């Protein structure tokens, strides 16, 4: 279906006056120093993420308001108010002090989305301890490897995860001094060589003075998603809280009265920056669903919990689209006022689905583990061009660059100052949540910078209105008969076909043209693979893209391989197609 290129905002998009309405004016008026003024700072000087997220509110009228609202299928909801969150995180910080764990020491958390995970993360931050949350679905190898790499001294996990995934591998983690176990039955755990969370927490005082951390002190270590190769450990500092705060206002438009739901797991940077820190900084009430994706459940939660701001990912949106409109039609979301997505390019089809099914367009935004927070976004301040990831936020200067010499070290680049030319997306270094290093890989870190520009590794273009358009990851771009083809463009066109639920596109080596475009698609419920359908999809792609860019081959898969953060792993599609080794699959969803 042909659709207009711009979605103009209507009154329905502004149920609350947004924090930001004038794009240029908001950017000119912004400074990071002024943004920091919205925070409090530690009483004796310094800046600490945990203090700003929790303690700052615990002395205000927010004290008795719900900060985190946990729901699960088979257990009652649990609410933690800002005041309670302050007391419980104080307890945990005292537990760490009692164990001799202090500033700069490293703590890992391995758990589902249980309250204790949130207490451990925030309590450790208040103690100046560096935190790494891991996906609870990781297998023993990825867990051991990350704790080894990060020289973790403390692990917080549950008794059952410990027995299944850590106990037998503990000798591989010699730096681990303490393992704290949360008993899943709510009782007391008594595994040898571990400590019981509940016993320690009950004995710890509930007052604590936040350890004086400075903006440049390390706070969080996040592993990247492993979409393009072995995950990298990106180190972040307490000063990042200024970005978390500013982006919560300008990209997600959070207001204290919001009921907010970020569907990302804290094992991924989105689930920490925007599932824990940013909403607390804005004093909102966050929903945390402990269950995995389920279309019916998600629609019901959006409705019954009265969610107003929803931050999710393309993969989830595609799964909702796949489940069909009939299911959506059983629900109404009158409270919902702002929807955003991150993690992968958001196909225009998905933006429109939001408008037609949820009643609101979906606001795509772009960032990376390395950037620590949202950098480029569709926001309330301007209209949406479906397929574009939006415009740089206040305080962020983006540009498109070309490399002078492909393999130069350090890299040398030239800014492309004409619109609509593809090149590497770069950001002017210096925003507060910029990563400060890759764990044990200084050389790799240095390769990310050309002068004062941070090179993202993503290809994009910027149009004359300043909107950025994702082309593909530098590694995924296909070179075919002299054309450079971005997989996103091809995938988006395939997604327009009524039968296609998801598409992943790769370049397949070819002696004649360099690479040919091959597409892998999974189908919507109610469609079955077959030759006629394959030809029909192929014809649709040719008509929209032309023969040079349209896929030459289309294969059907029940689902596409993706990371636990929901990204299609094109490198795996390619390795499998070519019979090559699969490489690091530690983050593969459904993998070990
Ligand atoms: P690895 O670096 O280990 O290969 P990763 O890059 O997928 O993994 P993340 O930091 O979780 O790890 O993801 C950031 C990347 O995700 C971006 O560099 C970009 O390629 C992609 N991405 C995120 N948001 C968007 C978006 N809105 N549009 C297009 N791509 C996006
Ligand atoms: Mg990356």
Image (cartoon, helix red, strand yellow):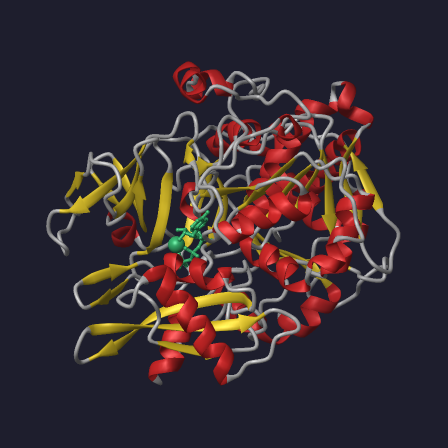
Q: Please tell me how many numbered marks the rendered image carries.
A: 0
Residue 392: x %, y % from top left: 40, 32
Q: What residue is drawn where x is 44% and y is 58%?
A: 492
What residue occupies the far left of the structure in this picture? 405
Residue 399: x %, y % from top left: 28, 36
Q: What residue is drawn where x is 31% and y is 39%?
A: 462
What residue occupies the far right of the structure in this picture? 76
Q: Residue 476 appears in which quarter of the rendering? A: bottom left
Does residue 197 appear to the left or right of 109 in the view shown? Answer: right
Q: What residue is drawn where x is 64% and y is 34%?
A: 279
Q: What residue is drawn where x is 33% and y is 30%?
A: 397
Report if residue 348 is visible in the image: yes
Does residue 555 appear to the left or right of 465 in the view shown? Answer: right
Question: With respect to residue 321, does 464 lie above or below?
Answer: above
Residue 529: x %, y % from top left: 55, 81
Identify which residue, 57 or 29, lies in the foreground: 29
Report if residue 101 is visible in the image: no
Does residue 331 appear to the left or right of 134 in the view shown? Answer: right
Residue 354: x %, y % from top left: 61, 46
Does residue 378 appear to the left or right of 119 in the view shown? Answer: left
Identify which residue, 259 or 216, lies in the foreground: 259
Q: Residue 257 appears in which quarter of the rendering? A: top right
Identify which residue, 540 or 549, lies in the foreground: 540
Question: With respect to residue 433, does 115 lie above or below?
Answer: below
Question: With respect to residue 503, does 245 lie above or below?
Answer: above
Quadrant into which the C terminus falls: bottom right
């Amino acid at each position: 279906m042909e659709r207009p290129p711009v979605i103009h905002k209507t009154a329905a998009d502004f149920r609350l006056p947004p924090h930001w309405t004038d794009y240029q004016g908001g950017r000119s008026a912004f400074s990071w120093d002024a943004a920091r003024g919205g925070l409090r700072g530690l009483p004796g000087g310094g800046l600490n993420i945990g203090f700003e997220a929790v303690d700052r509110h615990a002395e205000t009228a927010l004290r008795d308001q719900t900060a985190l609202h946990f729901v699960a299928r088979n257990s009652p909801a649990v609410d933690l108010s800002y005041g309670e969150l302050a007391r419980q995180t104080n307890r945990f910080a005292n537990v760490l002090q009692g164990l001799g764990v202090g500033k700069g020491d490293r703590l890992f958390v391995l758990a589902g989305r249980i309250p204790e995970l949130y207490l451990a993360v925030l309590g450790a931050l208040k103690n100046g301890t560096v935190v790494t949350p891991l996906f609870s679905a990781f297998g023993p190898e990825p867990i051991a490897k990350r704790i080894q790499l990060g020289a973790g001294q403390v692990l917080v996990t549950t008794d059952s995860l410990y027995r299944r995934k850590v106990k037998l591998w503990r000798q591989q983690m010699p730096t681990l001094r303490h393992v704290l176990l949360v008993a899943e039955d709510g009782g007391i755990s008594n595994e040898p060589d571990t400590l019981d969370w509940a016993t320690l927490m009950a004995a710890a005082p509930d007052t604590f003075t936040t350890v004086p951390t400075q903006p440049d002190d390390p706070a969080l270590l996040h592993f990247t998603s492993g979409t393009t190769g072995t995950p990298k450990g990106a180190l972040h500092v307490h000063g990042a809280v200024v970005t978390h705060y500013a982006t919560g206002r300008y990209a997600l438009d959070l207001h204290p009265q919001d009921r907010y739901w970020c569907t990302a797991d804290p094992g991924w940077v989105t689930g920490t920056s925007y599932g824990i820190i940013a909403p607390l900084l804005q004093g909102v009430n966050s929903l945390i669903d402990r269950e995995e994706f389920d279309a019916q459940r998600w629609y019901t939660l959006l409705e019954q919990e009265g969610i107003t701001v929803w931050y999710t990912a393309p993969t989830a949106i595609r799964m909702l689209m796949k489940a069909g409109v009939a299911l959506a039609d059983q629900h109404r979301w009158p409270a919902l006022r702002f929807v955003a997505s991150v993690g992968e390019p958001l196909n225009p089809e998905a933006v429109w689905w939001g408008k037609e099914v949820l009643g609101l367009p979906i606001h795509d935004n772009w960032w990376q583990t390395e950037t620590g927070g949202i950098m480029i976004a569709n926001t309330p301040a301007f209209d949406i061009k479906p397929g574009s990831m939006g415009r740089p936020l206040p305080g962020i200067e983006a540009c498109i660059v070309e490399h002078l010499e492909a393999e130069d070290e350090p890299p040398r680049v030239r800014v492309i100052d004409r619109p609509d030319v593809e090149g590497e997306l770069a950001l002017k270094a210096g925003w507060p949540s910029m990563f400060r290093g890759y764990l044990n890989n200084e050389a790799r870190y240095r390769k990310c910078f050309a002068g004062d520009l941070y090179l993202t590794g993503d290809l994009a273009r910027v149009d004359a209105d300043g909107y950025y358009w994702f082309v593909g990851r530098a590694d995924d771009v296909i070179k075919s008969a002299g054309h450079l083809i971005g997989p996103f463009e091809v995938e988006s066109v395939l997604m327009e076909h009524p039968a296609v639920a998801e598409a992943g596109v790769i370049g397949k080596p070819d002696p004649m043209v360099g690479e040919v475009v091959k597409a892998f698609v999974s189908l919507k419920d109610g469609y079955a693979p077959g030759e006629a359908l394959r030809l029909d999809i192929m014809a649709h792609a040719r008509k929209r893209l032309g023969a040079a860019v349209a896929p030459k081959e289309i294969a059907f898969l029940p689902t596409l391989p993706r990371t636990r953060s929901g990204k299609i792993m094109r490198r795996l599609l390619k390795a499998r197609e070519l019979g090559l080794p699969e490489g690091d699959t530690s983050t593969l969803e459904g993998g070990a």
